[in-house]
Image: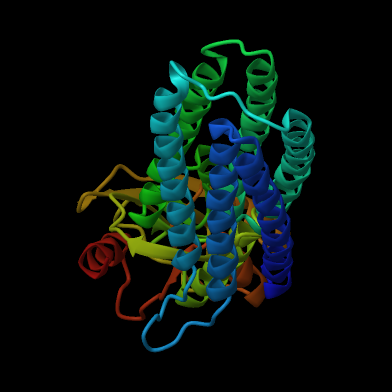
Amino acid sequence: MNTHVLKEGEKVAKKSLIYLLLIGTLKLVAGIFTGMTVVTADAVKSFASTLGVFASYIGLKLSRKSADKHFEYGYHRIETFAALLVALGIIYLGAVLFFKSINTLNSSPVGNFHPIAAIITVLAIINSYKLAAILKAAGQKTNSLSLLLNARTKQMDLIASMAVLISILANYYRVPYIEGSVSILISLIILKEGLSSTKESLFFLLDYWDDPILSRKIRKILSKEKEIVMRINKIRLRRAGTFIFGEAFIDINQFAGIQDLREETNILERKICKINPYIKDFAIFTHISKAEKMLVAIPIKKDLGLNSEIATNLKDTHAYLFVTLDDDRIGKPHVKKLGEDHKNVMDLNKFLNSEKINILVDNKLSSLIYFNLRETHHVLIYPNFPDVKKVKQILELMLIDT
């Protein structure tokens, strides 16, 4: 996610400020000339919206700053803090309108210049509709919470301005209670939106954020790597301004090499970051747990069970003895004969991989077989020690070693 997109969000916020200041000034002038409380309140609401967009502009601008010694994780939360200020401004606006509406409920003063007030209100409706669409598009593009909140505010403004238009007509025809009732309804809608937005912003600041769809996509990517990832313990996500940060805690195959693990985790992190353009950083923390069960394959010269002699090369290998080491206990072995037609690279790979082994005792394997088993299937190739002759001896050594 580059800074170019954030700059576009700043430009949208800057242009919106000019429009809001202009329409707010026109509403205030209309409110003074007409003497209608609802029009003046609508002007106050527009200026409050201006503060919200200004907070978004400052937040987006500062969130682009690079990390430094004072803010080692960057300034991304400033945008979320700006969103909180916007939400608090919405609550304040709703409270002011509510108390003003109560005062005008029983006795609404008869206004003047109703056509001027109606024209300016219609202009405000058009302005709110356009701004809501522009701010929403910019908020979605930049993943900016504050811009999205301002878009919601303008949608509320649209509804409020329509109600103001009804109030102007009611005032003109001297219909009682309409202006006050409409104003109360508007203020309650605004208060509800403000409280909801404040809760969302506070949760983001406190690192509470939940996106089950994104979490499922990440889990799916990790689950596909069955050769490396044994278990997914936890996935954590948090929002900081326009960006998303995350981490996964996984158990890995204890037989995977360090180099394989490094490469695989780097690939997984890149895949996860491609899911969503707003994922700025994702870390994978690995834990190597001791395997409770290990299936061992040992080349033997002749089948004598655990007393079989270990074959030191492929030519002398008559069969492979497969045995499970389970919780420091040696399981019951089974033997599969190795025919001459199985001793080529491809067939021997299939022969060994069909058993899903974890450890293979070396018998001077060719480089192709070694690479396939070690790098592709993460099989641990165990050395064939010259002083260890019997299967039982090497298994006892493994129990100590692993």
Quadrant position of the N terminus in the picture: bottom right
* Viewer-side residue, 371 vs 340: 371
Foreground: 367 or 261? 261
- The picture quadrant where one finds residue 125 is top right
- Residue 172 pos. (x, y %): 69, 19
338 horizontally vs 2: left or right: left
Is 115 drawn above or below residue 342 in the view shown? Answer: above
Question: Is 401 placed left or right of 239 in the picture?
Answer: left
Q: How is the image coloured?
A: rainbow
Q: Answer whether residue 390 is visible to the viewer in this image.
A: yes
Decide: is 37 above or below 339: above
Q: Residue furthest top?
A: 175
| Residue 314 can be seen in this image | no
Which of the image's four quarters has the C terminus?
Answer: bottom left
Position of residue 310 measured from the top left corner of the image (x, y, whole percent): 40, 66
Q: Which quadrant of the figure has residue 114?
A: top right
In the displayed structure, would residue 314 be above or below residue 160?
below
How many numbered circles are shown? 0
Q: Residue at x 51, y 48 (%)?
A: 356
The residue at the point 33 percent across, 62 percent down is 288
Task: Give the x, y percent position of residue 51.
Answer: 53, 57
Most foreground residue, 398 or 42: 42
Task: Give the quarter of the image for residue 289.
Answer: bottom left
Which residue occupies 67% across, 24% down? 168
Q: Residue at x 39, y 80 (%)?
A: 71
| Relative horizontal placement of residue 158, taking residue 328 as reference (left or right) | right
Residue 141 on image: x %, y %: 71, 55
